[in-house]
Image (spheres, rainbow, N blue to C red):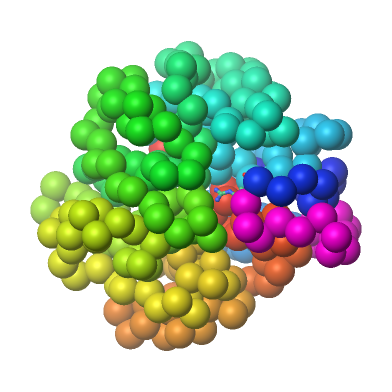
Amino acid sequence: MCPPRFFAVDYVINPWMDPTKPVSADVAVAQWTELRDTYRRLGHTVEEIEPQPGLPDMVFAANSGTVVDGRVLGSRFRAPQRAAEAEHFRRWFVEHGYRDLTMPERINEAEGDFAWTGKLLLAGTGFRTDPAAHAEAQEVLGVPVVSLSLVDPRYYHLDTALFVLTEATDTTPAQIAYYPEAFSPGSQRVLRRLFPDAVIATAADAECFGLNGVSDGRNVVLPVEAVGLGAELASRGYEPVYLDISELRKAGGGPKCCTLEIRK
Ligand code: ARG
């Protein structure tokens, strides 16, 4: 995670960003600190990277790498305003002993568009990640990749429209939640086929970034407004944990965007 000490909305690269609206880095840091402390309280280890001046979106650490079995695929951003972030995160991985690290040739916004189910890497495209990056991820990470097309600009990254609730094991399937309307008709059919028991989110769940949740298989961190989705998850045995992420949402991000999950 990256504390948002230099948080701002200075440019527009998604429909949520409005530079004419006031934003507060202090409020962003306070909300982010709650998120980090929630993970720690739930028993998870959180490591931090130093934020950099001039990179206001660096708080969205999910966009900076994909780690499966200790193997790292770095990122390459579509927007020039974010391009320099990739090198800071690459250095973090190197300094923290990740030897098996590949920087991509194709545009790939990492866990913004890649979701690991335990068996498959679900990969979004349409707004940010180049479809050719899906094949590159498959080759570098050595895991099967399933391409999904995003069609609604508000849900420009896969992680704004879908998240994994429980990873698959050898004997149990993965469980996911998603908002079907964010996907092309063909991708909706793929999702129905792969995940017949998925939690289907509503427009209201999606609009508050409810699909940008983070689940450890039991506790699910959600934006405080995502009460409909939270109730549905509770009925399936999960424990919703609600947080205020309103300041970060002004840049088009939520809990997951702030969180790069490292699978050693
Ligand atoms: N302002 C950032 C961008 O548009 C937000 C990124 C949110 N990250 C995410 N994983 N969805 O790139």
Note whether residue 85 is visible: no
Note whether residue 133 is visible: yes
Closer to us: 101 or 131: 131
User: Within the magenta stretch, is there residue 48?
Assistant: no
- Up/down of 256 relative to 232, above or below: above
| Residue at horizontal 45 percent and vertical 36 percent from the top | 129
| Residue at horizontal 33 percent and vertical 85 percent from the top | 235
| Residue at horizontal 54 percent and vertical 72 percent from the top | 207
* Percent of width and height locating residue 163: 39, 58
The N terminus, quarter of image: top right
**Residue interval drawn in magenta:** 14-32
Where is residue 2, by image quadrant?
top right
The C terminus, quarter of image: top left
User: Within the magenta stretch, is there residue 25?
Assistant: yes
Answer left or right for 243 relative to 99: right
| Residue at horizontal 31 percent and vertical 62 percent from the top | 176
Q: How many marks?
A: 0
Answer left or right for 207 relative to 166: right
Answer left or right for 95 relative to 109: right
* Percent of width and height locating residue 209: 54, 67
* Percent of width and height locating residue 7: 81, 48
- Up/down of 8 relative to 185, above or below: above
- Up/down of 242 relative to 256, above or below: below
* Percent of width and height locating residue 152: 45, 59
